[in-house]
Image: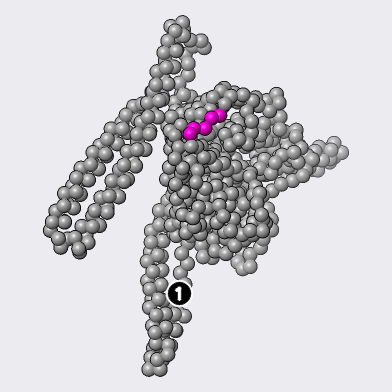
Amino acid sequence: MALNLTPDTGRVVISSEARLAYLAQSETSQSSNSLYSEAEQAFRHWAQLAERCRLIEEELAQAVQDEKRVLFLLEQQQAINERLEQVGYFRRAQKIESVLKGLGFMREDFKRPLANFSSGWQMRLALARVLLLEPDFMLLDEPTNYLDLENRAWLLNYLKQYQGGLLLVSHDRYFLDSLVEKVAELFAGRLKVYDGNYTTYEKTQAVELKSLLKEYHKIENEREKALAFIQRFRANAAKASLVQSKIKLLAKLPPIEIPESLKKISFKFPEPPPSGQLMLKVQALALGYGQKQVFSNLSFELKRGERLAVVGPNGVGKSSLLRLLAAQLKPQSGEISYGQGVAWGYFAHDLTLKVDKGKTIYEFLEELAPPALYLQLRKMLAAFLFRGDDVFKRLAVLSGGEESRLLLLSLLVKPVNLLILDEPTNHLDIYAKDVLLEALKAFKGSVIFVCHDRYFLTNLAQQVLELKDGQGRIYYGDYQYYLWKKEQEMQTQPEEAFPAKTELRTSGLRHLADKQRKAEYKRLLRLEEELLSQIESLEAEIKGLEGLLSSPDVYRDGLKVKDLTGLLEEKGLALQKLFNEWQKLEEQKKAKAKGI
């Protein structure tokens, strides 16, 4: 497939027989053709061969008296049919249906005009066409964009079985770790290839960057010394030759560029306002559009400090639920109530800025941030990919992705104690996702979020709310526990279609016991958070005392040393006690998790 760019130097060598397919980040159409017919375009090359086969049939009817010609045409026909069978042309209907459904389309979508689909769904079709082509080599630019968790899992499985070559750009760490065998890093105008998956690349890169940083500091130290010498003796005629030698040395020192990922940017949220223990209570919530019921009888609670992920297949109402919680929608029935002192903030990937577009990025953020964050603003902007002079760009010229990142950041600088986040990782690279993840893990408020990045989900969620078949169910554990529980449930099939009478009589008791176990597990989670906070605080105290002991003013005073040593021993015993309590708590959690 021909691409729009050509290299300034060098060559791209491709076999004349190789078939390439390319997926761009953005591809939309106003075609009036149906979704199915657009997907079928992936087979148009083979359709031409099929048409050639049809023409041979007609020619055979005319050449019955010419034995040599008939034999030649039959050989051609057989070769074409074998090739069409090999590429699955005669099974294209099944292949098209399988790929479209795997990427989230419903059968009733097949006849809809392509122009009726959003840009996100059109990108899914573009991906479907690339997959249906089954080329020798695929070039995929962010293939998981616009896909939910189920569709990403399907695509991952599809690509694992794909026999051709694959080159992709992706910011989905789990997807990369599960799929790739090599990682190509483009840095400072050079390309370097590492063996292994993304995690292996990170480990290898960390060693290389450590060496690079050492060299960087060495050269910067030489540069500073040379500059200081030149500044001091520039006007001294007796040192003129030495000054010139230092100037020449400066010119020879090689510039070393440090990658952004090495500049450990981190930030903290503003201190959340105080609130009660209960942050959010949802009772018998129902939502529908016309004749379609999205979900009904949905009930759950969110406590202070809890992080709840909302998951489920496409179209079950995950984003709609978050819009309800953020008062962007009104429910059909049911009640949403917030606890005392709750101040919430809402982000959705499709929101737009509704402010004076003449302001710069920095001016916009500075007006929203509390004074305590002013010194962090440049770091926060850099973490969200606004670096250098980017912070002075006018809001009017921002792309959709830039605007979305700025909207998310504008929410994070506000002092709130409940974050409602709908796909916050969209438009972020892996590094920016890591910065956001660490900030959210350290956030002392509560978080309820929808996310299609499995690594992000695994490392942030403490509980999971699954929406499925119009109902909701809470899993009182992290995302790994949720996956394990789902697998256990799939393996355990009921022996009878209907419960026995004795089961019916005890079902109420079992339900009560389940409810008590879940409540106990949530209590253990809260205790764990408190224990870990105490451990962190005590470790900081011990580190401070150790620092005092190393001070010359202290270690010369025997009495002070004795007092500090005694206090350190006391704190050490207290820390060991907390660790023992935490280990017991972990065992209790595991025991409770098995029964939930």
Q: Residue furthest bottom?
A: 237
Q: Quadrant of residue 32?
A: top right
Q: Is residue 329 magenta?
A: no
Q: Residue at x 61, y 59 (%)?
A: 360
Q: Residue at x 41, y 20 (%)?
A: 514
Q: Residue at x 48, y 10 (%)?
A: 499
Expressed as whole percent of the image width and height from the top left, the position of residue 362 reads 57, 59
Q: Residue at x 51, y 59 (%)?
A: 378
Seen in the image, is 379 located left or right of residue 236? right
Q: Residue furthest left?
A: 558
Residue ID for mark 1: 254
Indicate the amino acid at tag 1: Pro
Seen from the viewer's position, the closer of residues 86 and 122 is 122
Q: Is residue 337 magenta?
A: yes
The answer to whether 79 is drawn above or below residue 474 in the figure is below
The answer to whether 446 is drawn above or below residue 386 in the figure is above
In magenta, the rendered stretch is: 336-340
Expressed as whole percent of the image width and height from the top left, the position of residue 329 reads 64, 33
Q: Secondary structure at mark 1?
A: loop
Dominant secondary structure, magenta? strand
Whether residue 58 appears in this view of the structure is yes
Whether residue 182 appears in this view of the structure is no
Seen from the viewer's position, the closer of residues 212 and 295 is 295
Q: Residues within 10 Å of mark 1 (few under 14, many from 20)?
A: few
Expressed as whole percent of the image width and height from the top left, the position of residue 29 reads 74, 46
Seen in the image, is 162 located left or right of residue 517? right
